[in-house]
């Protein structure tokens, strides 16, 4: 009984999410959200890239210091 109720809630939740997504697409809100996610992704990439670069430089400095 609980399993059926849980599945029903899941289906209803999925339908609600899809309705909200479709409404966002129609209003243009989804485009803005996608653009924000892309921007965030670029920032995350830049941060990771910078961290890698700093660590690489630090390792090179440590190698020079120990040689």
Image: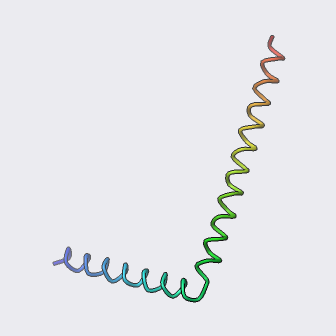
What residue is at 84 percent from the left and 17 percent from the top? 65
17 w.r.t. 64: above or below: below
Task: Give 29 or 11, whichever is nearer the viewer.
Answer: 29
Determine the residue located farthest toward the top in the rendered image. 67
**Residue 52: quadrant of the picture:** top right
Q: Position of residue 27 (x, y in %)?
A: 59, 89
Instruction: Judge by depth and name the residue closer to the eye, 54 or 31.
Output: 31
Q: Residue at x 23, y 80 (%)?
A: 5
Colour basis = rainbow
The location of residue 30, given as percent across then percent down, is 58, 79
Is residue 60 positioned above or below 22 on the image? above
* Horizontal and vertical percent position of residue 58: 79, 29
Residue 24 place in picture, x, y as percent: 55, 84
The C terminus - image quarter: top right
Q: How many marks?
A: 0
**Foreground residue, 54 or 38?**
38
Residue shown at 65% from the left, 59% from the top? 41
Examine the image and state in which quarter residue 3 appears. bottom left
Q: Residue at x 41, y 84 (%)?
A: 16
In the shown orientation, is residue 5 left or right of residue 46?
left
Which quadrant is the N terminus positioned in?
bottom left
């Amino acid at each position: 009984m609980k399993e059926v109720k849980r599945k029903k809630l899941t289906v209803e939740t999925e339908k609600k999410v899809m309705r909200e997504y479709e409404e966002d697409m129609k209003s243009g809100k989804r485009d803005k959200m996608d653009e924000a996610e892309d921007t965030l992704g670029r920032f995350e990439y830049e941060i990771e890239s910078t961290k890698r670069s700093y660590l690489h430089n630090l390792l090179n400095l440590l190698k020079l210091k120990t040689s």
